[in-house]
Image (spheres, grey):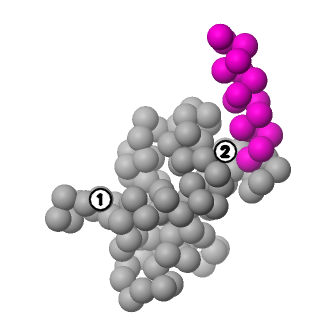
Amino acid sequence: MKHINKMRIIFLYLFFLEKKQLTNKYYLEKGLVKLFTKLVSKTDQEYTCIEALSSKFKNQYGQSVTQIMEILGLAPNFIVFLHSWHTFAVTKKDNQWQVALRQDSEAKMSV
């Protein structure tokens, strides 16, 4: 069983290395910033719901963001991960988690 899990991790690691280089926390953050920017560019809103960002991520990369976080050994859930970066501002509005790029974030300039 452990061998199968190791093979799965190696396969996913190589898949993402080839696909978009989501091989560490930094590249994952950059990928999320790019997807976020695409989402909000279609609206006049600063925030988007986390579910929309997560769904766009899965469509783009073929795996959920939490699966990639697990492979990389990152935060236990997506909201905790977003809170851990100064790039993102996370808030809960009307029982829905929303995310934006912080105004002081350098991420806006690097997308």
* Residue 25 shows in the view: no
Q: CA distance from mark 1 to mark 2?
A: 24 Å
Residue type for callout 1: Trp
Query: Callout 1: 10 Å neighbours few (<14), some, many (20+)?
Result: some
Q: Quadrant of the N terminus?
A: top right
Residue that label 2 marks: 24
Question: Quarter of the image holding residue 80?
Answer: top left
The kind of residue on which mark 2 rests is: Asn
- What segment carries the magenta color? 1-16
The answer to whether one can see residue 17 in this image is yes
Mark nearer the N terminus (1 vs 2): 2
Residue 50: image x %, image y %?
A: 39, 60
Q: Is residue 42 magenta?
A: no
Q: Quadrant of the C terminus?
A: bottom right
Residue at 37% over, 79% down:
46
* SS for callout 1: strand
Image: 39 above or below 79:
below
Q: Is residue 63 above or below residue 9?
A: below
Work out which residue is located at the far left of the displayed protein and give it: 94
In the displayed structure image, the side of residue 106 where residue 6 appears, left or right: right
Residue at 40 percent of width and 59 percent of height: 51
Residue 16 appears at what percent x and percent y?
74, 47
- Residue sitting at x 64%, y 61%: 60
Query: Residue 104: horizontal and vertical position, in percent?
Result: 44, 73
Q: Which residue is mark 1?
A: 97
